[in-house]
Each structure stands twice: as structure tokens, then as C-alpha cells.
Amino acid sequence: MLFKVSWRNIWRNRTRSFVVIGAIVVGVWAVIFMIAFTMGIVESYVSSAIENDISHIQVHHPKFKDEKEVKFYLNDIGTLVSNVEQQANVKVATQRTLSNGMLSTSKGARGVQIRGIDPTKEAVVTKFDKKVIEGDYFGKAKKNPIIISKRLADKMKVKIRSKVVVTFQTLEGDITTAAFRVVGLYRTQNSTFDDMNIYVQQTDLNRLLGGESIGHEIAMLIEDTEQLESTQAALKAMFPKQLVENYREISPDVNLYETQIQMSTTIIMVIVMLALVFGIINTMLMAVLERVRELGMLMAVGMRRLQVFSMIMLETIFLGLIGAPIGLLVGYLTVVYFGKNGINLSAYSSGMQKFGIEEIVYPALESGVYFQLAAAVVITAILGALYPAWKAIRLKPVEAIHKI
Amino acid sequence: MKNVISVSGITKTYNPKTIPVHALQGVDLEIEQGEFTALVGPSGSGKTTLLNIIGGLDEATEGTVIINDQDITKLSDGQLIQFRKEHIGFVFQAYNLIPVLTAKENVEFVMLLQGRSQAERNKRVNELMAAVGLSDKMNNRPSQLSGGQQQRVAVARALAPKPTFILADEPTANLDSKSTANLLDMMAELNKQENITFVFSTHDQRVIDRARRVVTLEDGKIVSDDHRDV
Ligand SMILES: Nc1ncnc2c1ncn2[C@@H]1O[C@H](COP(=O)(O)OP(=O)(O)OP(=O)(O)O)[C@@H](O)[C@H]1O
Ligand SMILES: [Mg+2]
């Protein structure tokens, strides 16, 4: 009966109930969308970082990380890579020779990182071949081919088939200069990366450096990302003298980014919930105050305070129970829709590309979040109802009845 | 006859610390089972105050209120609610019914609070709605009933838990003369047939004329107490 009265009570003032329900719906929807959108961005950022650059796990000479000098190389890297690929859960691995240097054209010179890659493997690990948007990928027998980014090409005023000069240090410590011919132009989503990195074939670079079988980096993709840590541990055992890092360690900003964005999501969620709490307090207080005499009568005829309290609480919980599922559903549908079609940020993304965020964001949300949110809303509703319900039971029946 | 209500030495002072209002100044009153008593007197004489104190809705400043041999001034808040639920039926001037419940559900409500069985509730509701002459309005909401009909449902509601007596503070104040007469007929009938004790306050001479006992209050004191045959 208490349920029945409470349920019907919320339909007494339809407009007001709809406003509250609407507020809950919008609140829940907004929070869902916000979280999903941020998750989408985080994921896009992380996967873009993994795809373009760091992959899941990398192996380096322990000193290479800080010093970035060519002399900290891994010997006989080809064998190491085949050993890595034997390892369980490793999908594919590739090797790179890395060197800092200078790229010169008739327009001037720029400091760059020269990445000597194994073209076939690199195409699998970072899909680098797909990022070549003009010209060809490596492979056609040409002498000293080089691929630079479209951005850099524009800045340096070079085209396909232009000749560029690359200067760097050999393993012996001498400065050497070599001419390369541009065969392709690439573009990633990360413009800072594009400005900094040029690609050559590892065999070419190694020859010029003076070490046929060396390399500085082994990068690999794994099958099951859940087992990132255990795979990493196995590799550490395999290379006790080398530095084996996963993508979070390699790129601490990925980690920072994840936590920071999660924090701002939490703050937004708290703000929305607070707004909801006050909205509910306000509404339910109105609902109590305009029913003072009726509540007084109920107490006079024998309704216990706990029952009055429960009645007000129930009314609020009902509002929450109507609003929350609608909000969840609308939120879910929005996430599913945009998860499929993406949200095109290209209008704003010239800024975002700097940070490695893709132009199209696909919001994503784990199902657990929906339940958490549903619980949060119901708790919010309960919190918001406490004060009005408490107010209601503080009424003295006589005074309440005589209040005009 | 047995006394169902026995109050003695009741005083009530509102705002004792600021501007004291001596609403009741030593009231003694005994009411027996089956009486049909009107409480009359000019506005501000203390009728409502007295009814509230008898009904346990308000506390007396001094004095005792004994109902069915139980001194209710000694009960705790919670016990008092329980006591009211079992012994006293209330009919107020207005706002008697829960607007979102039908007439039937309103009558049932107090019995539900008492935890009576479905069968018992149904039987009693039918009985009472017939007694107040509203068997055909069972499923109407209060807003679909006239003022007089609402007050009758209120009486049925008050009677539902089989209280010792019914207190009604100006039950006819908002009714036209025809509805007033109807309600009074019904109350008198219930009083006569089922020996239900009624105590009601009123300003209305037509209501006073129907009472078998008229207690007159003035300035918080009983100035006359007439028993008569109607
Ligand atoms: N809550 C209160 N606070 C202060 N004074 C009060 C309060 N309730 C009643 N009074 C005063 O007590 C006195 C008796 O009031 P009461 O309501 O009992 O009179 P009444 O006989 O019922 O009057 P009416 O016929 O107008 O309903 C009046 O002077 C009234 O102003
Ligand atoms: Mg009065």
C-alpha cells in the first residue's frame, strides 16, 4: 500500500515529476556520454601511440633509453628477434636501428630521428606502409630510399624523387653524410611525430653506421593485451641484461593521460550528481511542504514516522528508478551509435593531432560502468530525499493540520 | 455505563514563555460509551484544543486524560501513535483523505497500517461504505466526490479500525445544509445502531440541535453541560 501511495503521489504533480525524471535522464546520459567519449579518446590515443610508434613491448640496451647514442646497440639483433617471436603470446616482432641526425635540403636543415626499419616487418607491427600517402613504400630496388612525412616534405620543399642529405654519427664516432632519394611521404595522426621522424631501410643505415647486424630496438605486438605483464616478465628472463618495457613504461604520458582523464571524468560525474542531489532536495521539499496537512492527517490517524519517511523516500526512489533506466538506455544507444559511426572531430582536430588523437573518436564504455552509474543515481536520489523525508517526519500532526 | 473518556484538571497554555495564551483553564469532562456529544462555544473558546488533547494529538499543560482506563499523558510518542491507531477515529474539517487513493483504499488504509488481513479488510470496507451510503462510489478518488461524500468517507475511514470513539472537529464546516443533514443522519444512525461514541465540535445550530449532550466552552472553561433527548 505504501508503494501504491508513493507511486501515485509522484503522478500528482506530473510536470514536476517529469522535470525531475528529465533531469535524471539528462544527467545520466551526459555522464555516460562523457565517460564513453573520454574513454574513446584515451583508447584512440593509446592505440594510436601503439600503432604508430611504441607497440606493446620494446627491448633496448639499458643505456640507450637515456643517452640515445648509437653505440648502445644490441648485437646480432636478427637472432634476438627470432627468439622473441618464439615466445608465447608474441604476435610479431621487428627490429630498428635508430640514430639522431640531420636532414638537409636546399631549403635548410632539421634535426631528425632516423629510423632504420625492416620494411616487411614494420608493415606488420606498426602498419607503417599504410601511412605512406604519396609515392611508394620501400621494396622497389633503388639505392638509399627514404620516406619522410608529408608535413616535413612541405616544410623542406621536397617532393617524391627529390634527393636529400642525411648526416649522422657512425659507430666509430665519425660524422658521415649520405644522400637518399625520397620514395614516399607518410602521415600519422601525430604531427609532432611526423616532424621528427624519417624512415630508411635498416640495411642501408647499418651499412653506413658500420655494423651489419646491429640494431637499437626490438618492438613487438602481443596477442593478448591482458597478459602484457606476464609476457614482459618472460622476456625479461630471456634478456636479463637488456631493458624490457611495456608501452606504459615506454611512454609514461600514456599512463598520465589515462589517469588524468579518468580524474576529470570523476570530477564531472560528481558535479552532475551534486546538481541532481540539489534538484531532488528542492523538488521533494516542495512536494513535502505542499502536503503538510495531508501528512499531518496521516500521522494523526496512525501512520508511524518511519512509514511517512519511507513514503517520501519511495517517491524519490521511484523517480530515480524511472529516470535512471531511461538515461542509461539513451546513453547506451548514443554510445552504440557513435561507437559504430564515430564522432568526427576533424573540425577541431588540427590541435588534437599534435597529441596523437585520431580525427574520429569512437566512444566506448564497459558494461560495468552502466551498473555503477545506475547505482550512483539511485544513491544520489536517496541522498537527495533524506532531508525532505526528515523534514516530513519532524512535522507535528496538530500543527500540520492547522497550518493554512 | 462505562466512561470511555475521562479528563480532569486540564489546562493548556500556548507560548508559556512569550505571550501565554490560556486556551484551557481547568476542564473536567467524562464521556460514556455510546454518547453523541457536541462541543460548542464561541471561536477561540478552546474546542479544537480540547479535542486535540483528548485525541492525543497535543499535550495538556496540566491534568490527566484517561481513555479506556489508560492515562495517555504517560505514553511515549510511539506508544501514542499506536494508541491513536487502535482507539481513536478522527474526522477533520478538511484534508481527511489521501487524494491519490480511491474511497475504498482510503478506508482500507488504516487497517493496512494495522496489518489486518485482506478478507477482513474487504468485509469491513464493504460494510462501512454501505453504512455511509456510498457503496457505489468505492472506486472514486476524493476529487470525484462532493464535500459531503468526502466527509462520509472520512467517517467510514475513522470507523474502519473499530475505534473506541470518534473525534470530529467541525466536520460540517465546509458542507452545505443538505450535506450537513445527511452526514448528521448517518452519524446518528451509526450511534444508535452500533452504539458508536461521537464527540464533535461545531458552530452550527442545526448540528447542535441533533446532539444528545451539549457541552459549552467559554474562555477555556466548561460553562454548561446539558443532556437531552432528541
Ligand atoms: N498553536 C497555537 N499557538 C498559540 N495559540 C493557540 C494555538 N492554537 C490555538 N491557540 C489559541 O488558543 C485558544 C483556543 O483555540 P482553539 O483553536 O482551541 O479554539 P476553538 O474553540 O477551536 O475556536 P474555533 O471555533 O475558531 O475553531 C485561542 O485563543 C487560540 O488563539
Ligand atoms: Mg477550532
Image: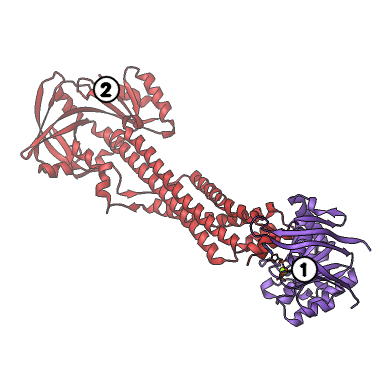
Q: Give the color of chain B as drawn.
A: purple
Tell me: B230 left or right of A401: right
In the rendering, at what x and y percent does residue A62 appear?
A: 29, 20
The residue carrying pointer 1 sits among few (fewer than 14), some (14 to 19) or many (20 or more) residues within 10 Å by Cα, namely many
* Residue B115 in sight in this render: no
Q: Which chain carries label 2?
A: A
Instruction: State the image coordinates of residue A248 (x, y, percent, origin top left).
Output: 35, 32
Q: Give me the chain letter of mark 1.
A: B
How far across and how far down the image is residue A120, in percent? 26, 34
Would you call the spot at circle 2 few (<14 residues within 10 Å), some (14-19), or many (20 or more)?
A: many
The residue to which callout 2 is attached is A77
Which residue position is annotated with label 1? B168
Distance (Cα) linking label 2 and label 1: 100 Å
Q: Which amino acid does label 2 sit on?
A: Ile
Identity of the residue furthest to the left in this view: A106
Shade representing chain A:
red
Question: Is the residue marked 2 within 8 Å of ligand 1, measured from its CB?
Answer: no
How many numbered circles does the render carry? 2
Compare residues A322 and A379 and report the one nearer the observer. Answer: A379
- Determine whether, in the image, residue B88 is placed left or right of residue A394: right
Which corner quadrant holds the C terminus of chain B? bottom right
Residue B201 vertical placement versus A305 (above, below): below
Q: Horizontal placement of B5 versus A113: left or right?
A: right
